Amino acid sequence: MDENSFYSIDRLVEFGLSMAVATQMANSMNIGLQSTVTPGADNAMLPGEQPVWYAVLDGSATRPLSLAGLSRLIAAKRVTKETYVWKPGMSDWKLAEDVPEVLRLVALTPPPVPEG
């Protein structure tokens, strides 16, 4: 064999190895993309987002609330420590004062501004 033949074989081997590495990279990227959650109609909340909360107001459950939405109701004095709250994963409705995440928000809400 002449020198050009060896060069061609070396190039083919390099090409084959490069393709194998590229295929492995593409496969691992595809696995990562398949496990990625994309926000949309089917999954409105991303992992790590604030949990969905419900509160009992005027005898009925509210629509789903983010922690920020629950905070707004607390600031408006519509949710107090005596309000029943629930989120997925809880076995039953509990008073806000019995749920540390919510009680912390209630406790951080300033009292009404003094008159006068």
Image: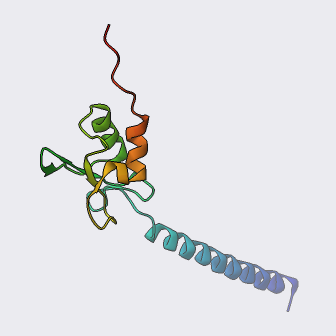
Q: How is the image coloured?
A: rainbow
Q: Viewer-proximal residue, 7 or 76?
A: 76
The residue closer to the viewer here, 85 or 82, is: 82
In the picture shown, does residue 98 fall above or below 78? below
Q: Quadrant of residue 69?
A: top left
| Residue lying farthest to the bottom in this orientation | 1
Residue 50 pos. (x, y %): 40, 51
Q: Which residue appears at 56% of the width and 74% of the height?
A: 28
Coordinates of residue 30 in the picture (x, y in percent): 50, 72
Q: Residue furthest left?
A: 59
Vertical relation: 34 (above or below) 86: below
Q: Position of residue 79 (x, y in %)?
A: 26, 40
**Quarter-wise, where is residue 6 in the image?**
bottom right
Side of 48 relative to 85 (left or right): right
Q: Is residue 37 above or below residue 76?
A: below
Q: Position of residue 1 (x, y in %)?
A: 85, 92
Tally of marks? 0
- In the picture, measured across the screen, residue 89 lies left or right of residue 28, that is left
Q: Quadrant of the C terminus?
A: top left
Answer with the quarter of the image where residue 42 lies. Answer: bottom left
Identify which residue is drawn at 27% across, 45% down: 82
Indicate left or right for 59 with 88 as reference: left
